[in-house]
Amino acid sequence: MESFKVVIDGKECEAYPGETVLEVAERNGITIPVFCYHRELRPEGACRVCLVEVEGAPRLVTACTLKAMPDMVVKTNTERVRRARAGVIELILNNHTLECPICDKSGECELQMTGFRHGPKKSRYKEPRREKDIVIQGPLIEIDNDRCILCRRCIRMCGENMGNRVLGILNRGYRAYISPFNGDFMESGCEHCGSCVDVCPVGSLLDRAFKYKDRPWRMDKTWTTCLFCGSGCKVEIDSYHGKVKRAVGRIGINDGHNRGYLCVRGKWGWDVIYSDKRLKEPLLRVDGELRRILLEEALKVLKEKIEGRKINLFLESSLTNEELEKIAAVFGTENATSDSLGFYNFLKGFEKVKGTRETDKFSSIYDADAVVVIGDFIEEINPVVSMLLRLAVLQKGKRLLRVGVFPSKKLDSVAFSKLLVDQTEIIDTLKHVILGMIDTSYSSGNRKIDTFIKSLRGKKVSFVVAGTVFFSPEAEEIGKTVAYLSDRVVGGKVVAVPPKANSLKVVNLFRLKHPEELDGDVNVVVNGELERDFPGVELPKAEFTVLFTPFYTPDVSGADLVIPVEVWLEKNGTVDGVDGKLEVKTVLEKEFSLLEVLSQLPVRNTGAESKEAEVERVNEPGQRLLEREKGELLLTVLSNRTGWNSVSYYSKNVAGVAGERVLLLNPEDAPDSEMVKLKVGNGELLISFRKDSSIPKGHAVLRVERFTRDVSEFLRGQFPNLSGIRCQIAEA
Amino acid sequence: MAGRVKMEKLLLRNVDKENSHTIDVYLKNGGYQSLRKALKEMSPEDVVEEVKLSGLRGRGGAGFPTGLKWEFAAADVKEPKFFVCNADEGEPCTFKDRVIFEKDPHALIEGMLIGAYATGCRYGYIYLRGEYPIGRKILERAIGEAYEKGFLGENILGTDFSFDLYVHSGAGAYICGEETALIESLEGKRGEPRIKPPFPVNAGYLWKPTVVNNVETLANIPLIIERGGKWYSGIGSPDCPGPKLYPVSGKVKRPGVYELPMGTPLSEIIYEHAGGIVQDRKLKAVFPGGASSSVLTADEIDVPMDFPSLAKAGTMLGSGAIMVLDETDCIVRAALRLIEFFRHESCGKCTPCREGTDWLVRLVRRIEEGEGSEEDLDVILSVSETMENSFCGLGMAAHNPVASSVRKFREEFLTHIELGRCPYRRG
Ligand SMILES: Cc1cc2nc3c(=O)[nH]c(=O)nc-3n(C[C@H](O)[C@H](O)[C@H](O)COP(=O)(O)O)c2cc1C
Ligand code: SF4
Ligand code: SF4
Ligand code: SF4
Ligand code: SF4
Ligand code: FES
């Protein structure tokens, strides 16, 4: 793009078409005060504090809405501008409650800072303060309208960026106030992403978990990476004297790939540290009973039990690189399974076609014109990734195309085109696209597919595979198909969004097997929970079972040795995330450390244990595997956003907004009864259901907050699949 | 002066006829002939040229040249385009548009049709003030008649031109008269103005090109097509021509809507057409262009009532609504009533208007109640200055009546302050 010059305060500045004067000024180190402007939001021009003088314009103009034009001459600091600004700030301060001493925002409040720098020096307001005593409390968020300056950042954030439209304005003029549209956060569909709280410039939108807990200026602020899922969001953890007080995303300031956006888990899940289910000391089974022991004793037992024995390794995938490398060294890499098995299968398929399992960084999508998103329920599994995809359309003008089965609230409203097909048709649909990319005259016989193909032609295309794909029986076949397709478009980058924070490292370091193929003598489960991470799987019969876990999981009762470890908030290290290497940092003290325990174990001398066994190459897309007989539905078992990684089970904060367990059926597939019996193989589950016309016919979604024993048993034999599971329903 | 000769009624030519609101009466008096002429004998470009030639400026308040607006809209290639009539008339003392759509609705519809033809608009809306239920009935009936006769719908008069027209009632917010707030409201959203640019002609209703014109503006169109832009440009003020409806209210003997050539002196309107001041009292002050115009004193009323002349006089023509105060009226109280209206109608989007109107109300009320001080007057003027930086026209103008009253009737404000009460209050 051709740049041009504008003059701001006498300084020649380079500007690009479409940029506002405010953006140009900011880039050139010229500060213009703002309230309603926020770099992640569409300009609103509402607060009127960013007024500047433009040569030739009779009125002052708001810099946040003014597009820079060649040879524009702008002044940001004249007497007239200063007076106008002070006038606006005076109007805001007149009725503002002066409760800084008890306001959580105090110290990082934009009204304090901007008011101090640009506001009037004394008050002329003689009227009694106009109180706006409207406080709206949700489980995690509170709006104190008395402090609100009506900048509307929260409304734009929630409605436009998050696509939720929870917040709005009630009443008008000086009586206007902010509220969830029907007065209640939960009922208005708030997903508790916390983004509105993050962008509120003042202490109006509050994090209730932090309310009156501490002061911004005295806390230790540590940037780290949220390991609750594969989005790997950069987050600031604030603590005081070693105790965590809150998590903040700092949208717009945060330089991580998530740019400060978080989800409910990253924003509020930090209190897992203080869960009363935390394991406080090692346990050893003696005479059939678990007894507390000292760590040294535990280590001694552990060394004895594993020496010379083959290990059945069960890995949960949010461990750090350092931990995983140590685990590989002491337990071996050849006889392992993981909750990332489906992801592994996908990459195996991908590698068979591409010759490499290397996929691209998430940020590579910003170089593409069109982003094809393959997979469902990304907003539950990797909430922030789905946000970033949405924003790629809204902010960067990318063309987003979806291939999937279920509607997506976040993405469909911004998607340029979408192919929502029966789950059995995913691979065949992708094959049509392949043919269409090879042969410009190809017609699939389906208009929707043809227009989809047309909108990719001549465009630089990136693929993002995420969500349920990695939990489908077709994961490997989809891997092949996407790899094949990506070679037939311009660009052709592929981002495989890891379901868990360090799935990438796990699949690259270990040769993963299905749990049934494990043939070792001792079971070692690291960070995992069987029901949650390996639903339907039972530990192999073994001489001894060792558990490394931060919590009293349901598995503890079946273990022989249990060693407590830390949660990610207490770790230092790195992970191989969706956007490259991400750093994990903490200032917290911890009592037990996985890494320390592992360091005391002998390294295995299994020689050059390389998993780089040749994969056989194929040069064709994958094959459709999913079938469905008459009377069958394809079931997806979906962990709720709050329940993913059992966060709500260990976090009191998140538990307050936890989802429900419910079966969703297309009205046409639903029986007349209130409950249904859901059958999968030998498994059965009695459950209540809801008719939901957004569920396509022939499919069913079982939402769970947690994979409890009954769900896990119901899914016996399905691992690693959680989607595309053939099931039947019967009235109950 | 030419204005004194009884002028031919143009905009109000039909309103005194019996059943003037029916299509039969309209047709009998030459109605829809201009539409026929435009569709059959003129290209859309010709129509735009004719309107440009006429010099017609919008009667909604801003006085934007109508031909130019149409040219911009016609030049935009996005489809479909929309033609919207602004019939939200919500300002106190403005009641001119109502006369047209209640008494001569087909003139409005014909004007819209010609405008839609000229700009390539396929759909039209009349955004009607919520408090005009009778108007709604009349307009809906008229639209029905026009459909029946083939003036609305597909292939109008056998041409390729098609146009569908709907009435949309507002929900009682003055701000929805501002064109972008109107569009938001039409889209079903909260009525609040949008950032301009982009302007509605390029990105309006559903972000498609949209022409928004005032009722009175559109009622001029059939005349211009019938008799030519050149003829039209000869009426009234040369740089701001045409007939104009002036609603006159307050302390005059004959309040009402007067059709006069643009530029008729304010004094003539008050003393000749509206019959002078009640009980022949002394005139005290006039708000010459609606509730948000700056006040004129008795010495300042020799001004021609058109956009440029009033702007030069430090006030504005706005909707052309003239509000007259006599010597028994309290200016402080008048200013208070007006600013209270704007406080109530401010949408609350921007700080200067939301907070400024409230502060002004509180200041002026305190003075009116005898609790004011002289410093308050300076504060009023400085708040008024800040409000100049409001987001939309409402806030930019809302302070005018108060600030101009303080400037021109400072003594009267001071009397309130010194006496500690309103000198006009009896008892
Ligand atoms: C606060 C406010 C209220 C307005 N109300 C009206 C109105 O009631 N009717 C109207 O025609 N124009 C109104 N306008 C002017 C419109 O924004 C717009 O300029 C006009 O409808 C354009 O039509 P015209 O070019 O034919 O005048 C209002 C403007 C503002 C700022
Ligand atoms: S937390 Fe997120 S979803 Fe909830 S109101 Fe705020 S921005 Fe909207
Ligand atoms: S709650 Fe905060 S973000 Fe929302 S409008 Fe008020 S001050 Fe702005
Ligand atoms: S999206 Fe994932 S990584 Fe990001 S905050 Fe949520 S749980 Fe953490
Ligand atoms: S000036 Fe501001 S608050 Fe007033 S009506 Fe316009 S946008 Fe709303
Ligand atoms: S920051 Fe520009 S108007 Fe608010």
Image (tube, coloured by chain):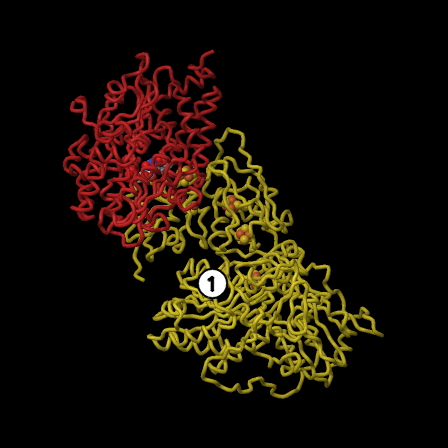
Looking at this view, is B236 or A178 the one in front? Answer: B236
Query: Where is residue A457, by image quadrant?
Result: bottom left
Q: Position of residue B364 (x, y in %)?
A: 44, 25
- Residue B326, placed above or below residue A219: above
Identify the image quadrant of residue A183: top right
Asked if residue A672 shows in the view, the reply is: yes
Question: What residue is shown at x 71% (from left), y 65% (from top)?
Answer: A551
Residue extending farthest bottom: A607
Residue B66: x, y in percent?
24, 41
Say whether mark 1 is within 8 Å of ligand 4.
Answer: no
Q: In the image, what residue type sits under mark 1?
A: Leu
In the image, residue A297 lies at what x, y percent?
A: 79, 74
Q: Report if residue A529 is visible in the image.
A: no
Residue to which mark 1 is pinned: A389
Identity of the residue drawn at 73% across and 59% down? A276
Q: Is residue A374 left or right of residue B247?
A: right
For residue B16, above or below residue A352 = above
Seen in the picture, residue B185 relative to A703 is either above or below; the reply is above
For the C terminus of chain A, the quadrant is: bottom right
Residue B13: quarter of image: top left
Q: Quadrant of ligand 1?
A: top left
Chain in yellow, by letter, is A
Judged from the image, the secondary structure of the residue bearing numbered disc 1 is helix
Image quarter in which the N terminus of chain A is found: bottom left
Q: Chain of mark 1?
A: A
Which chain is rendered red in the image? B
Point out residue A272 in the picture as x, y percentages from the top left corner.
67, 60
Q: Nearer the viewer, residue B248 or A106?
A: B248
Above/below status of A730 relative to A71: below
